[in-house]
Image (spheres, grey):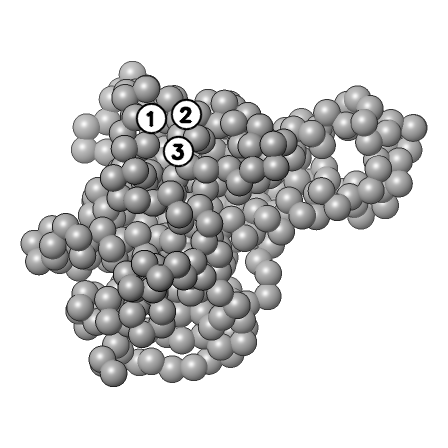
Amino acid sequence: MADFSPVKNVLRPSLAVAACLLPLIGCAGESPPEEGEAPTSVPGAESSPAPVDTVIVEFGSEQDIEAFFDEIGYGPDHWAAGVREIPRLYVTAVGDRWRQRANDDLTVQSKKRIFFRAMGPLALRSNELIRAERDRLLGLPATEALSDEERRWLAELAEDYGLEVPDVDMDAGDGADGEPWGALRTELQNRVDEVPVSLVLAQAANESGWGTSRFATEGNALFGQWTFGGSGMLPAEQRASLGDYRVAAFESPLLSVVAYMRNLNTHRSYARLRELRAEARAADETPRGLDLAGGLDRYSERGQEYVDEIRSMIEFNQLQDTDLTYLAPGPVYLVIPADGTG
């Protein structure tokens, strides 16, 4: 067995690391982000109970990483055999060492294999959080039968997802199919939904240079999301005509993924993506990354050229089947970069 952790490789109760694994609860009274701004926290998100054991791993080399992936059933041979169950393996930070090794020492194939396998569980965990909210939303009774707690939760969810809460008395006979609460619940069903893993992987690779960009290594920023108001990382060539924008930084790669999904699920620029996903749901089909990429024409100034590039990355790297993956029950593997960050 490879020495995956020269520093530590221990089993601990999962509750001891739950706070650092998913610090997703927003602050009370936190104002929503401005249009085009990436949220750095996710108000209202709730983490589901973590598995019993957590394995903390620090790797000495990228070769050890791949050997560890093989040992836990997460290698190329397992994928080729049709295994679509993904371990709960969460990288705690990108780290400077990854940029150096990925650019200087690794083959292109190894760099891609490690990057995609590190990103996959993060995408699935973020989707898992969204799915918990969606399941509760879809399970609500008709509007007139909602409890006070359910009404408050629905109003909070609408605010979290950038929707205005109707100023009406829900006891006044406004049914589940009536206006305006019925329309609100329909729009929430379009927004509170998962993002195909293949789309997450392709965009993360494209926007972060396979995790080697300055923004990725300094701030775990994998999708180039903007923030305003003076916080975040200053681009080297900031365009004054676009205001005082920065690139949002995050405490962990997972929070970067969560914020990216919230952006796709709330910003008006991606309404078409949400429509395409809703159409797939209505047809009782699994939303696929190749299809939803058609709603990303406003993610980049390159428009349709960007859409074509993301689709090409999905196809060239054979990412389509990642849309069918799911997280294993446990344990949780917390992966600490070898340079000691995170």
Residue 307: assigned label: 1
Q: Nearer the viewer, mark 1 or mark 3?
A: 3
Q: Which residue, as the protein is rendered here, is positioned at the far left?
A: 104
Residue at the image position 24 percent from the left and 66 percent from the top: 66
On the rendered structure, is 336 left or right of 47? left
How far from the left and from the top, in percent, is residue 306? 29, 25
Vertical side of 260 occupied by 34: above or below? above
Gap in Å between the C-alphas at discs 3 and 2?
A: 8 Å
Q: Amino acid at mark 2?
A: Gly
Residue identifier under label 2: 294
How far from the left and from the top, in percent, is residue 58? 28, 72
Residue at the image position 18 percent from the left and 33 percent from the top: 236
Q: Nearer the viewer, residue 244 or 227?
A: 227
Q: Which residue, as the protein is rendered here, is positioned at the far front?
A: 81
Q: Which class describes the residues within 10 Å of circle 1: few (<14), some (14-19), or many (20+)?
A: many
Position of the C terminus, as image quadrant, is: bottom left
Q: Amino acid at mark 1?
A: Val
Q: Please, what secondary structure does the residue beneath circle 1 have?
A: helix
